[in-house]
Amino acid sequence: MTPEDKKLSQLLLDESYITEEDAQNAENHLEKNPSTTLVDYLIQSNLLNKKLLGQAIAEYYQIPFADLESKAPSKNDILKIPEEVAKQHHAIFFGEENNQITIATDNPENNSLKNELAPLFPGKEIQFAFGLTEAIEDNFIHYQKPLATRFSKIIEEQTQIAPEILDEIFNDALVFNASDIHFEPQINDVVLRFRVDGVLREAGRIPLENYENILNRVKIQSQLRIDEHYTAQDGSIHHETEKAAVDFRTSIVPTVNGEKIVLRVLASYVKSITMSDLGLASRDRMALEEASEKPFGMILVTGPTGSGKTTTLYAALRNLNNPKVNITTIEDPVEYKMVGINQIQVNSEADLTFSKGLRSIVRQDPDIILVGEIRDQETAEIAVNAALTGHLLLSTFHANDAATAIPRLLDMGIQPFLLASTLEVIVAQRLVRKICGRCRHSVTVTQADLPRTFTDLKRFFGKDEINLYLGKGCETCNQSGYHGRTAVYEFIKGSPEMKDLILKNPSSQEIWQLARAQGSRSLFEDGVEKVKNGLTTIEELLRVAEPPAK
């Protein structure tokens, strides 16, 4: 345990946020896993969340807590403190009220900071608030010049061009919470795009003459062949910065203009996601929690690639994770490593497939099993049998909606009586962008203001004219009006009536008809509630879901 972690552990003990036993368990874990921090351990073990952690430390210093996630300073406010001062002291401008300046810092005991800041704010009283290090550093993005400017400087200096350009790209991707990085060769240059909140946006351009070196470096870091240019290749990169380590999943494919790279960012924030963070309606959350608390049965989460299925399952696992149960997963790949869970990586070269790995897991005396994806009949059969023989099994499955999943499993050869005996709940989901909290404003909307594809304003909202929310666009959301994502859900419970229906080999229409009669809402209807609550917009909802037929 580092000196910083020891100090934090003692602070939390003194303030009674953790017990002596928690502190000792943390120390033991950190000794065995030196790359893990105390904060990671506390969050993954459900002992604290980030906000509570920040409040605890602020309470210790007897100063306010600066919640930079919910109240981020503007770029103009950030730039009131010179970059070198801000980064040296880990301090940013947080607010001003009644001639008093509040500075967020992670080191309130820094006696020289006030003296350095005093000339910047003459005649003002300066007070400190505690801010979490990660949140403070996220705001340093406002000091950065555009990627294109930084690329030009790196190329002009003619030093290590490829490594330095990739470092800049990786760091920006993490700051902007990008889920994917695209390198797209064109005739004259290479377009660099980030997928942020599910939508691609251009981040910069790379000269063609520099792209080959960048491509080769990505291949080497991903342990791929640099002499192969005409077939697709997949790999992974482990990248470490001063702040954290991050993994990227690499995909390279040949195009007519050259080899295209896509890097999937395996975001570490998923490790701290809880059920309350998912955006579930209270009754849906209760249904998922009830199903996950059963000693056996099957929970399926369906949706297309990138719809947040794995995040939902990991949130459920965090609820279930405790020393009294054995949780084992088999995934391809293992994207997020979690404390206290046994995780197995699919390895086709070693003939370790989902089906063979699952057979071995069942012999390992697990209580809870997570299968990354049910892809074929053999895996489906083993999964159903595992759920039938005293295991709680969670998995993802590709289906357009919850009702379609049941006929698809039956078509794969699963016996209806086995599926009926094991199925507890099916969840379908999609991700929608959230309206930016900083620039959100209320507007009055009529049918004429809505997209032509949505003609049912009165049907879903009960009025011909309603008040909804939109984002104007600001620095926080990069002028998009959206910041962050939430999910819309569709639930089908394995009720006694549903189990009886499954025995009759029903169609998806028959399944949904019964589910509706039992109170299930469609993806669109769940989204409408989020629109009413000001979380997202009708336009964003229509991007991922269709209104149900009347």
Image (cartoon, rainbow, N blue to C red):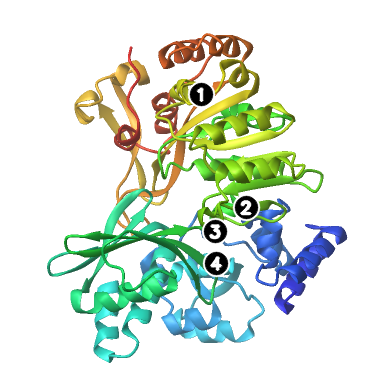
Residue type indicated by callout 3:
Ser
Q: Of the numbered discs in the image, which one, if any, rests on residue 413? A: 1
Residue 83: image location, x then y, percent: 42, 80
Q: Are marks 4 and 2 in contact (CB under 8 Å)?
A: no
Image depth: mark 2 or mark 1 in front: 1
Q: Are there few (<14), some (14-19), or many (20+) residues within 10 Å of tag 3?
A: some
Left or right of residue 183: residue 291: right
Give me the C-alpha separation between circle 2 and circle 1.
26 Å
Q: Which mark is residue 344?
A: 2
- The answer to whether marks 3 and 4 mark residues whose Cβ atoms lie closer than 8 Å is no
Q: Residue at x 64, y 84 (%)?
A: 111
Point out the residue furthest to the left here: 187
Of mark 2 and mark 3, the one earlier in the sequence is 3
Which structural element holds mark 2?
strand
Q: Would you name the residue on which mark 3 appears? A: 268
Q: Amino acid at mark 1?
A: Gly
Residue 53 visible, this angle: yes
Q: Residue at x 57, y 69 (%)?
A: 133
Badges 2 and 1: C-beta atoms under 8 Å apart? no
Tag nearer the camera, 1 or 4? 1
Task: Work out whether residue 146 can be spotted.
Answer: no
In this view, the mark in front (2 or 3): 2
SS category of the residue bearing label 4: helix
Which three-letter amino acid code belongs to the residue tagged 4? Glu
Instruction: Say if 345 sits above or below 529 in the image.
Output: below
Q: CA distance from mark 3 to mark 4?
A: 13 Å
Q: Which mark is residue 6?
A: none
Q: Residue at x 70, y 60 (%)?
A: 41
Point out the tag, 3 or 1, that comes first from the N-terminus: 3
What residue type is disc 2 on?
Ile
Q: Which residue is mark 4?
A: 134
In whole angstroms, how far apart are the C-alphas of marks 3 and 1?
Answer: 37 Å
